[in-house]
Amino acid sequence: MTVIASSTAGAPGLPIWRQNLRVFCANKSALFASAVVVLFVAMAIIAPIIAPHDPNDTDLFRRLQPPVWKEGGDWAYILGCDALGRDILSRLIYGSRISIFIGAAVVLFATVIGILAGLAAGYLRGWVDVVISRIVDILLGFPYLIFAIGLMAMMGPGLVNIVLALVYKEWVIPCRVVRGETLAAREQEYVEAARAVGASSGHIMLREILPNILSAVTVISTVRMANVIIMEASLSFLGLGVQPPTASWGEMVAGGREFIMEAWWVSTFPGLAILALVLAINVASQGLRDAFDPRFAE
Amino acid sequence: MKKRVLLEVNALKTTFSTRAGPVTAVDGVSLTLNEGECLGVVGESGSGKSVTFASVMGLVRANGRIEEGEIRFMGRDLRAMSAEELRLVRGREIAMTMQDALTALNPSLRIDEQLAEMMEAHLDDLPVFGPARKRAIRDRSVEMLRLVGIPSPEARLQQYPHEFSGGMRQRIMIAIALACRPKLLIADEPTTALDVTIQAQVLDLISDLRRELGMSVVFITHDLGIVAEHCDRVMVMYAGQVVEEGETSEIIEQCRHPYTRALLASIPRPELRGQSLNPIPGNVPDLRDVTNECRFRSRCAYAVPACSRPVMMREIAPGRKTRCIRDGELA
Amino acid sequence: MNPAKFFQRLLQLAPVLLGVSFIAFMMLAMTPGDPVALIIGEHAATPEQIETLRRDLGLNQPLLQRFASFLADAVTGNFGTSFYHRRPVAEVIGERLPATIELSLVALIVALVTSIPLGVLAAIRKNTIFDRIATLFSLVGVSMPGFWLGILLIMIFAVNLQLFPVAGRIGFSHEVDPITGFMLIDTLLHRNFAAFGETLRYIALPAVTLGLPMAAILMRVTRTSMLEVLQQDYVTFANAKGLKPRRIFFRHALKNALIPTVSVAAIETGSLLGGNMIVETIFGWPGLGRLVVESIFVRNYPLVQAAVLLYAVTYVLLNFIADILYTLLNPRVKL
C-alpha cells in the first residue's frame, strides 16, 4: 500500500524556503524591484567613488545651472546644480546614504525591540503583557509624523535624534505582530512539548517560537522601511532632519522649493529618487509577502 | 411506469486553471435524474461532486470553465443559454442549499429581505403594485418559514442570520431555496455543519418537503449514511469521475467497486461499536498528475497489474454501472 | 450595540488619553534648555526676576505635580500663553483650526470618491489591464512623498498650466466675513458664488495632495475586501438564487465590502492630520499644521505641545469612531 503525499506548490521534495524562493523569483516585477533596491544600496556604499564631485562644493557661478540636456547645461553636472551651485547628482548619491542608513537603522532597532517586547508580552502574559500593550496603545495614539515632529522639535535636529525619534514609535508595529503570533504559537504543540520537557521561558521564546514567526516579522520590516524613509525625508524637508550642509533628499527637495519657477530640476530629481527607492521597496516586499507569507497573498 | 427525465448530464468536463497548471476537477461525468427522484452523490472532498453541480447551475468559479459535455434540464440545453436565461432557471427551477448556512446567508441583511429578493427575482404571479405586493411577499415568506418549521415566523423575519441557531439557519436557507417552488433542489453537504441531533431533523425535513412539493433532490455528501436513508439512487465519485452507480439498496448491499466498499467500511456503525474504524489509506490523487490508469489504483487493496490500463464505466445491469475490472470478484 | 458596552469602550479610552497627555507633557519637560531663558530671551534679567518667573510657571515643583496641573489646565482648555503671539495658546489654535478641518474634510472626500469606484472596479476586473493600472496607481500613491507631490502639482498645474493658484486660501480680491470659519460654507452663506469658486480653486491642489496617499490606501483596502467578499458563500448563494447581477453587486457584495473601507477611512483621517503639517507648509495654508511648523522654529514650545496633544486626542477619538462604525455596520460583531 502506498501513501501518496499531495504536494501543493511546484517541485515536491524541496524545502519550503526553496519553494518560496522559486515563487518569489517567478515574480518578475518583484525581482526587478529588488534589483533596484540593491542598486541604491550599492550606490550608498560606494558614494565617494562614483560621485563626480564633492557634494558640498559650492560655486555661485554654477548657481541653478540646468541639467545637461537643457541649454546652458554641461556634462560635468549632468543633473544640474542647486542654488549654491552644488552638483545635484553628487548630492543625490550622497543623500542615498542618509535615507538608507536611517531606514535600515530604524527598522533594525525597532524590529529587535519589537520582537523582544512582543515575545515577552505574548508569551509571559500577565502584568508584562498589560504594561507593554498599554504602552503600545498609547504610542499608537499619536499620528506618526506629529510624534516625530514633536520629538525632533524638542530634541533638536541630528542623525542620532532622527533615529531615536522614529524608533520610539516604530517598534510598536513589529511588537504587535510578534505578540499576536506568539499568542497563537503558545497554543501550538511544539511549544507545549517544549514546556512539558521543562525548557526555560527564554529558551522557548527565542529558540522555539522566534524561528517560526521570523518570516512574518521580516516581511513586515521590509514594508516598514519604505515608510521610515518617507518619514525621514519629511522631517528633513521641514528642516527637522539632518543638518546642512549634509545632503539628504528631503532637504534637497525643500531647497528647490523657492526656485520652482525657474529651476524645476532642483526639487524634481531628489523627489524622484525617493519615489523610486520607496516604490522599489514596496514592490519587492509585496513579492516577499506573497511568496513567504502566503496568508496575506492576494 | 417510467418517469420523465428531469436532468441529464453527458460527458461533462470542467477544468480550473491554477498557479500550477490546469486541473480537471470533473472528467467525463454523466448522469440522469428523473422527476421526483432523490439522488445521492457521494465522495471525499476533491472528488468533483460539488463542481459537477456548480457546473449544472452555471456557478463555476471565475478560474474554472466547462470544457465539454452536455447539460439538459427538462430537455433544454443549459450550456447554450445566455447568462440572463440561465439566471431565470437558477432559483426558479433549480435551487441550491449550501454546506454552511452561517456563511451562505448574508450576515448584514435581515431574513425577510433575503427571502423577498428571491421572490422579487422570479415570481411573476405577485401583485404589481406597492402595498399589495409587499403583503403578498410577506405572506409567502411567513408561509415558507412555517413550512420549514420555524416557530413564530412573523417575528423572526425581522432578525439577522446570526440571531438564529445552526439548525434554524439551515432551515431558513432551505426556505429561501424553496421559496419559488423549484423542480430540483441541490443540497450540498446539508448536514456537515450541524450537530448530530439536528442532522436527522434537517434531512427528514428535506425528504418531507420533497414528497410534499413533488420535487427532485440531489444530496451531495461524503456520508453514505444519509444516502442509505434518504436516496433512491446513488452515484459514487472519485477523483473527478463516477466510479459506481445504482439503486441505493444495491450499492449498500452489494457494492461493485473497491472504493465504495472502502467508504462503506469507514462508516461508524452502532452494531460494530468497540471495533476500530477502517479509514481509507492514502489520499485522493493530485488531479494535476492523473494518468490513464485506474485512479483508485494506488489506494486499492484489490489492485492488479491490469489496473494500469484505462478503466471504462460499464453497465453491469440496467441502471447499474461500475468502473472496476474486478467487479465480479467483489460482488 | 447596547449603551453599557459603549460606555465601557469609552472608558477604556481613559488610560490611553492619560498616557498620550503624559508623553506630550514630557516632550516639553524634557526639552534641553531653560524655558525661562526662552521667555526672557535676549533681555537682561536679574536673578530675582528669573526666580519669580520660575515660580510663576511652577517650574520648581516636582514633575508629577507639574503634570497634574498640566492635565487640569488642558481639560479646561488652558494651554498657557503663546510667547510668540503674546496670547493664549488655545485662542491661537482655535483661529487656525477651521482651515485645517476644512482642508482635511475636502481631502477625505477626494480620497473617498476616487478610491471606492477604482477599488471596486479593480476587484471586478481582476487581472485585467485596468486592475494593473489601478494597482500601480495605489502603489505609487503609497510610495509618493507628500511634500514632493505637492511641489510637483504646483509646478505643473499652478506654474505651468496656471489652472490653480500657487498658495493661500483665497485671493485678496474677495472679502468674506467669517461666519463658521469654513470658507466653502461661509461663501455660500454670503451667496458669494464667485468667492466660492475661488475658494474651490485654492483648496483643490492641497486637498488632492493630502488625499492621494489616503486614496491609494483605501483603494487597496476596497479592492482586497471586494475580492474577498466576491469569494464568500453568500455571494455564491445569491447567484444560486438567480438574483439580478446588479442586486448581487450592490446589495450583497458592495455593502459588505465597504465595511473595512469605512473603518480604515476613519483611521486614515487621523493620519491625514499628520500630513497637514507638510501640505499646509507647501501651500501656505493658514491652518494648524503650518502654525506648528512655524512655532517649532521660533521655539514656541507650549503651542507645539498643545498641538501635539490635540492631534493625538483627535487621532485616538477617530480610532474609537472607526471601531464603533465597524461594529455598527457589522451586525455579526457584537461589542
Image (cartoon, coloured by chain):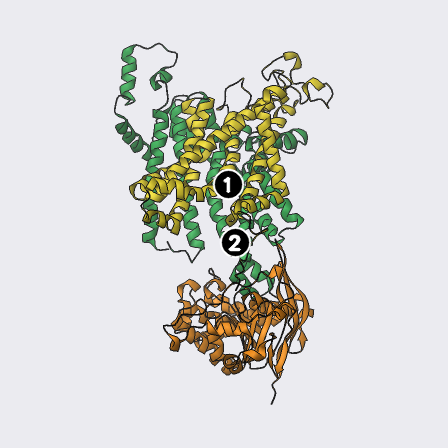
Residue A8: image quadrant is bottom right
Which chain is orange in the picture?
B
Check the residue under mark 2 and report the chain it is in.
Answer: C
Check the residue under mark 1 and report the chain it is in.
Answer: A
Label annotation for residue B194:
none
Q: Amino acid at mark 1?
A: Val
- Can you give x and y, in whole percent of width and height, for residue C37 in the image? 35, 15
Distance, label 1 to label 2, CA atoms, is 26 Å
Do dots 1 and 2 share one subunit? no
Chain A: colour as depicted: yellow
For label 2, the residue is: C257
Residue A266: image quadrant is top right
- Can you give x and y, in whole percent of width and height, for residue B73 in the image? 64, 76
Q: Is residue C192 visible?
A: no
In the image, taking residue B308 as reference, residue A186 lies left or right, namely: left
For label 1, the residue is: A219
Residue C239: image quadrant is bottom right
- Can you give x and y, in whole percent of width and height, for residue A227 in the image? 51, 35
Q: Count neighbours of disc 1 (C-alpha within 10 A) and say few if under 14, some if 14 to 19, many if 20 or more.
A: many
Nearest the viewer among C229 and B238 is: B238
Q: Secondary structure at mark 2?
A: helix
Q: Count neighbours of disc 2 (C-alpha within 10 A) and say few if under 14, some if 14 to 19, many if 20 or more.
A: many
Q: Is residue C254 visible?
A: yes
Q: Residue furthest bottom?
A: B1
Q: Is residue C158 above or below residue A289?
A: above
Which chain is green in the picture?
C
